[in-house]
Image (cartoon, helix red, strand yellow):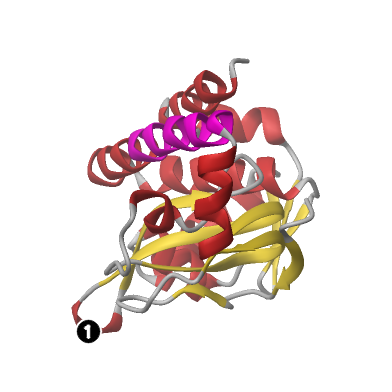
C-alpha cells in the first residue's frame, strides 16, 4: 500500500476526536478500535468496535468534515493510515474500493443496530461474553489487556457489575482475569454463555466479504 503509512496505536490512544476534522483513514491490521458517543457527565457509550475487517474514518468516505462520535484504540493496534485527501482520490481511481467501503458502511450500521438492541435486552453476562468473543476474534491472541473501568464503560455498567460477572466467568474456568489482563481459557463454553447477537454480527461481516 504505497499510499499508506504503518502506525502503531496504544491502548486508549485517540484516532478520531469528536467535532474535529477527520484527517486520515485507518485500516486496522491487528488490535481493536472502538467507536464511542460522549454523553453527559463524561461517560462514553460504545457504538461499535472495528478490527481487521473494517476501517476507521468513514466520514471521509461520506464527505462529512466532522462528527460527534470519537474513536480510540481499545486493544493495541497496528494500522495502515492514508491521508483523507489521498483516500478520496483512491475512491475515484478504484471503483471496487468504493463499492467495498459502501458495503462495509451497511455492515457497520447493522453492527450498531445489533449492539443497541443487545444492550437494551440482554444480561450483563451475555453482553460481556459477546464483547470478549468479538475482541478475541480480532486480536489473534489469547491474552487481552482490559481493565474493569474500560469494560464498565464499554458495557454501560458499573465496575462492581463487571467485576462480579468476570469473577463468575473465572470461577467457571472460562477466562482468567488478573490485574486487567484477560485470558480466554474455554471459548466453546463462553460461546454458549453468549446471546445470539455474536452470531448475527459474525454473519453481517461474512455477508460483506462474501464468505
Q: In the depicted view, which residue is nearer to us: 137 or 55?
A: 55
Q: At 33% from the left edge and 62% from the top edge, which residue is drawn?
A: 156
Q: Residue furthest top?
A: 211
Q: In the rendered image, which residue does mark 1 sit on?
A: 41
Q: Is 149 above or below relative to 26?
A: below
Looking at the picture, how far across and down is residue 55, in whole percent?
55, 50
Q: Which residue is found at the position 49% from the left and 38% from the top?
A: 101
Task: Please give the name of the residue rendered at 39% of the width and 75% of the height, measured from the top-left corner.
Answer: 21
Q: Residue at x 42, y 57 (%)?
A: 60
Quarter of the image containing the C terminus? top right
Give the structural element (helix, strand or loop) at label 1.
helix
Residue range (magenta): 95-110
Which residue occupies the foreground of this view, 144 or 75? 75
The location of residue 99, given as percent across then percent down, is 48, 29
> Magenta residues: mostly which secondary structure?
helix
Q: Is 42 positioned to the left or the right of 152 in the image? A: left
Q: Quadrant of residue 182 in the image?
A: bottom right
Amino acid at each position: 500500500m504505497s499510499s499508506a503509512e504503518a502506525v502503531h496505536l496504544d491502548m486508549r490512544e485517540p484516532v478520531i476526536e469528536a467535532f474535529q476534522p477527520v484527517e486520515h483513514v485507518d485500516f486496522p491490521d491487528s488490535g481493536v478500535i472502538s467507536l464511542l458517543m460522549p454523553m453527559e457527565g463524561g461517560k462514553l457509550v460504545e457504538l461499535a468496535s472495528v478490527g481487521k475487517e473494517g476501517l476507521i474514518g468513514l466520514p471521509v468516505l461520506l464527505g462529512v468534515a466532522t462528527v460527534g462520535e470519537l474513536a480510540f484504540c481499545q486493544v493495541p493496534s497496528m494500522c495502515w493510515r492514508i491521508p483523507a485527501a489521498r483516500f478520496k482520490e483512491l475512491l475515484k481511481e478504484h471503483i471496487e474500493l468504493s463499492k467495498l467501503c459502501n458495503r462495509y458502511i451497511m455492515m457497520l450500521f447493522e453492527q450498531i443496530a445489533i449492539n443497541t438492541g443487545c444492550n437494551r435486552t440482554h444480561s450483563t453476562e451475555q453482553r460481556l461474553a459477546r464483547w470478549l468473543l468479538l475482541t478475541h476474534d480480532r486480536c489473534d491472541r489469547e491474552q487481552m489487556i482490559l481493565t474493569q473501568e474500560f469494560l464498565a464503560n464499554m458495557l454501560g455498567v458499573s465496575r462492581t457489575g463487571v467485576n462480579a460477572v468476570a469473577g463468575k466467568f473465572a470461577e467457571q474456568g472460562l477466562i482468567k482475569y488478573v490485574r486487567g489482563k484477560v485470558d480466554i481459557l474455554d471459548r466453546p463454553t463462553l460461546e454458549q454463555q453468549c446471546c445470539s447477537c455474536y452470531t448475527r454480527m459474525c454473519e453481517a461481516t461474512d455477508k460483506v466479504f462474501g464468505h
